[in-house]
Amino acid sequence: MTRARLPRPEEVAAARADSRLIRAREERPEDETWRVRGNCRSVDPETFFPAATEPPDMAVAVCGGCPVRGACLAWALEAGDAHGVWGGTTPRERRAMVIAWRAGAGERRELIGVG
């Protein structure tokens, strides 16, 4: 098993501007009721956890027009989930996003005077 490398600074900078991350910030859920509205609710969960030798294309396609894609990605970033396809993103894509997400959370806390 190989270990995932840390994202480079330019990957994190690109993640900060990624429209999917921006959408996740805007659609950050308060609870998990969003799950029942996901396109994935009627798809075999194994689809979203393909083997390392299989492309994630089918899962990403299911997420494509999902009405809760932003909330799903926000959940995965909050949880730090490193496996599977969440919110139309692969684990590799989320590695940089999670760093940008956490940095953004710190910036918000400073703006409102918390922490």
Image (cartoon, rainbow, N blue to C red):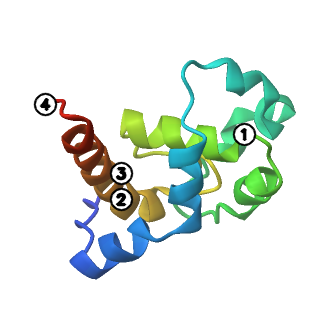
Quadrant in the rendering for residue 8? bottom left
Tag nearer the camera, 3 or 2: 3
- Amino acid under disc 1: Val
**Residue that badge 3 annotates:** 101
Tag nearer the camera, 3 or 4: 4
**Residue that badge 4 annotates:** 115
Give the Cα separation between the discs numbered 3 and 2.
Answer: 10 Å
Give the Cα separation between the discs numbered 4 and 2.
Answer: 25 Å
Q: Is residue 66 left or right of residue 16?
A: right
| Foreground pick, 50 / 34 | 34
Quadrant in the rendering for residue 53? bottom right
Question: CB of mark 3 within 8 Å of CB of mark 2?
Answer: no
Question: CB of mark 1 within 8 Å of CB of mark 4?
Answer: no
Point 58% across, 60% down: residue:
20
For the residue carrying disc 4, how many other residues have a C-alpha within 10 Å: few (<14), some (14-19), or many (20+)? few
Question: CB of mark 4 within 8 Å of CB of mark 2?
Answer: no
Percent from the top left, x then y, of residue 30?
Answer: 54, 22
Earlier along the polypeptide chain: callout 2 or callout 1? 1
- Amino acid under disc 3: Trp
> How many numbered marks have been drawn onto this rendered protein structure?
4
